[in-house]
Amino acid sequence: MEKLLEDLKQAMRDKDTLRLSVIRMIKGEVDKIRIDQKCEITETIFLGVVEKQIKMREDSLEQFEKAGREDLANKTRQELEILKAYLPEPLSKEEVEKIIEEAFQELKPESIRDMGKVMSFVTPQVKGRFDMKQVSSIIQEKLK
């Protein structure tokens, strides 16, 4: 969160309007959660906000490309670059598979009904660092 505030100040100094608007949007969402839920902002909450904004931009980008709106698509790509800078270093597929393997060794799931247990063990370690859809499909494949 401190990095976000520093980047906000720097964007103001640099008069970088696009970066400034993206950072203000993130800050606004984080502040809204802090006020609505009356809680301290944790790394997990912050990453959740950033991931949600990335997903929204990716969906918009797809729509803009289908509609042939290259001007809006380019702006959205730039916004995605700014947002992705706030995510932690991504994990490799091998690292994720190792985490999933640890979960299987510790939890010893027996069927697909244990999917939730495995996901709740793995999610905190990979959230924001790897595509959760892929994590889910890897776990499902192992449970078959």
Image (cartoon, helix red, strand yellow):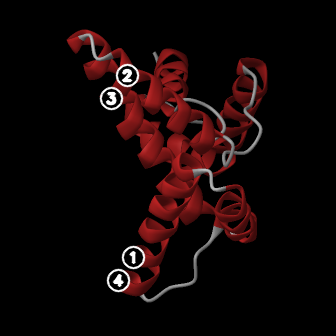
Residue at image position (50%, 15%) is 141
* Nearer-N-terminus badge (4/2): 4
Q: Is residue 94 toward the left or the right of residue 37 in the image?
A: right
At label 1, counting other C-alpha atoms closer than 10 Å, the crowd grade (few under 14, some 14-19, many 20 or more) is few
At label 2, counting other C-alpha atoms closer than 10 Å, the crowd grade (few under 14, some 14-19, many 20 or more) is few
The disc placed on residue 71 is: 2
Which residue lies under the disc numbered 1? 32
Secondary-structure class at tag 2 = helix
Q: Nearer the viewer, residue 96 or 100?
A: 96
Which residue lies under the disc numbered 3? 59
The disc placed on residue 36 is: 4
Tell me how far mark 4 sits from mark 3, CA to CA.
Answer: 26 Å
> Callout 3, which amino acid?
Asp
* Nearer-N-terminus badge (4/3): 4
Tell me how far mark 2 sits from mark 1, CA to CA.
Answer: 30 Å
Tell me how far mark 1 sits from mark 4, CA to CA.
Answer: 6 Å
* Nearer-N-terminus badge (3/2): 3
Secondary-structure class at tag 1 = helix
Residue 1 is situated, as x and y percent measured from the top left of the image, at: 68, 69
Tell me how far mark 4 sits from mark 2, CA to CA.
Answer: 35 Å
